[in-house]
Image (spheres, grey):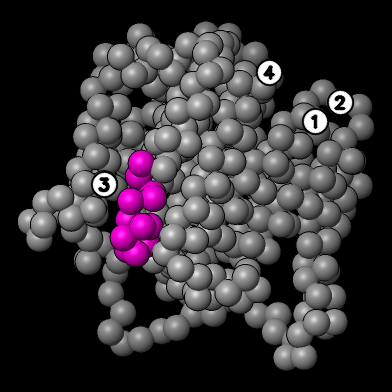
């Protein structure tokens, strides 16, 4: 049983994640079917992501997905979202991020997930510390790196301030330091542009509006539709178990969940900003919430009758989407 294996404390399970990612991402990469999402962010121009080959896209995406999966699982186990070690979050991250690449690859969002996880590590380390200025500066820096990589995430500065308000007594320094840390990556970017780029192009958002614009789900195939329905279903079913704790929850557990929920709200707001300013959707920025919340629910599958069925329904829909993307069902 898959859930039983990945819910146990077996660190060697990490070796299976590169195989899972490669099995989903690399076949269409070799076939030349992977496409980079056209978001026109600064990092797209810096590394010329629109011009690299499909195989290079697949390799870069696989590396970023594996890195994000490892960090997600370290975050989950180190800060004890569950009272025993589990590797389900890394499994979900690997599966979901790889499947999203079959629709379109957003290298900025995959990279920004890693920066967000690094910032979350710093945010969750400040619980009951007498001084947290260094941690909040570093958290602001990593959130700033995520925002420079994927600009709609600028809203994460507000989420970070809300975390400070909820976790700590008011201290104006703990609001200024995250702001300074958040601005450091942008300062380096301005200097880079001024020094090496004669055009001084510091535009973060480029939206190309057309009267022929349509909603992205209108062009989804049947397998994509089932996959997104399964993903949304799992996320909605896992949410109550994350929100409503058992009897007598500790302050640490309550703080952990509220802090994480503030991050989730920031990510949802970032999706709204992206749609409003550049007319695109990038669902891969919700991989972290899906992996943590879904990982918690599926790791406790023994206490939920519906969790195993939901997990295998998600796996079936993902498998159909993967096979269809590789031409197994033809035009059906």
Residue 28 among magenta residues: yes
Look at the image and give the residue range highlighted in magenta.
23-34
Label 4, on which residue? 251
Determine whether label 3 and label 2 are within 8 Å by CB.
Answer: no
Which circle, 3 or 1, is nearer the viewer?
A: 3
Q: Position of residue 294 (x, y in %)?
A: 42, 29
Residue 322 shows which numbered tag?
A: 3
- Mark number, residue 126: 1
Give residue 187's position: percent from left, percent from top: 83, 69
Contact flag, marks 3 and 1 (Cβ < 8 Å): no
Alpha-carbon span between mark 3 and mark 1 = 41 Å
Assess disc 1: are there few (<14), some (14-19) or many (≥20) residues with their C-alpha within 10 Å of its C-alpha: some
Say which label, 3 or 1, has the lower sequence index. Answer: 1
Q: Earlier in the sequence, mark 4 or mark 3?
A: 4
In the image, is residue 126 above or below residue 37?
Answer: above
Q: Are marks 4 and 2 in contact (CB under 8 Å)?
A: no
Q: Is residue 282 visible?
A: no
Assign a secondary structure to mark 3. helix
Do labels 1 and 2 touch, CB within 8 Å? yes
Residue drawn at the location 85% of the way across and 47% of the way down = 137
Instruction: State the SS at label 1.
Output: loop
Which mark identifies residue 129? 2
Measured in 3D between alpha carbons, the distance from the residue under mark 3 to the one under mark 2, in whole angstroms, is 46 Å
Residue with the most extreme bottom position? 199
Q: Residue 154: horizontal and vertical position, in percent? A: 65, 61
Helix, strand or loop status at disc 2? loop
The x, y position of residue 106, in whole percent, is 48, 60
Q: Residue at x 21, y 34 (%)?
A: 316
How far, Cα to Cα, is label 4 from label 2?
14 Å
Residue 38 in which image quadrant: bottom left
Can you say which quadrant of the picture contains the N terminus? top left
């Amino acid at each position: 049983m898959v859930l039983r294996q990945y819910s146990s404390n077996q660190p060697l399970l990490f070796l299976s994640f590169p195989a899972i990612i490669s099995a989903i991402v690399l076949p269409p990469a070799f076939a030349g079917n992977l496409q980079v999402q056209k978001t026109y962010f600064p990092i797209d121009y810096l590394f010329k992501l629109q011009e690299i080959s499909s195989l290079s896209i697949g390799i870069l995406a696989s590396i970023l997905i594996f890195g994000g999966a490892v960090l997600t699982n370290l975050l989950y186990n180190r800060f004890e979202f569950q009272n025993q070690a589990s590797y389900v979050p890394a499994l979900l991250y690997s599966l979901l991020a790889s499947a999203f690449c079959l629709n379109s690859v957003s290298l900025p969002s995959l990279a920004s997930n890693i920066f967000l996880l690094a910032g979350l590590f710093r945010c969750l380390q400040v619980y009951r510390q007498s001084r947290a200025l260094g941690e909040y500066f570093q958290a602001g820096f990593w959130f700033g790196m995520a925002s420079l990589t994927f600009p709609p995430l600028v809203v994460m500065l507000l989420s970070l301030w809300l975390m400070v308000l909820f976790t700590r007594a008011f201290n104006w320094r703990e609001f200024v330091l995250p702001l300074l840390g958040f601005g450091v990556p942008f300062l380096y970017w301005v200097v880079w542009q001024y020094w090496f780029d004669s055009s001084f192009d510091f535009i973060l958002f480029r939206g190309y509006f057309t009267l022929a614009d349509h909603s992205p789900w209108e062009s989804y195939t049947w397998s994509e539709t089932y996959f997104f329905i399964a993903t949304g279903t799992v996320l909605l079913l896992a949410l109550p178990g994350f929100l409503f704790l058992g009897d007598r929850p500790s302050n640490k557990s309550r703080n952990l969940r509220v802090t994480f929920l503030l991050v989730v709200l920031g990510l949802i707001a970032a999706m709204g900003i992206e749609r409003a300013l550049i007319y695109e959707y990038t669902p891969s920025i919700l991989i972290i919430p899906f992996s943590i919340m879904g990982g918690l629910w599926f790791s406790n599958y023994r206490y939920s009758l519906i969790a195993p069925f939901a997990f295998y329904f998600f796996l079936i829909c993902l498998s159909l989407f993967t096979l269809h993307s590789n031409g197994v069902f033809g035009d059906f």
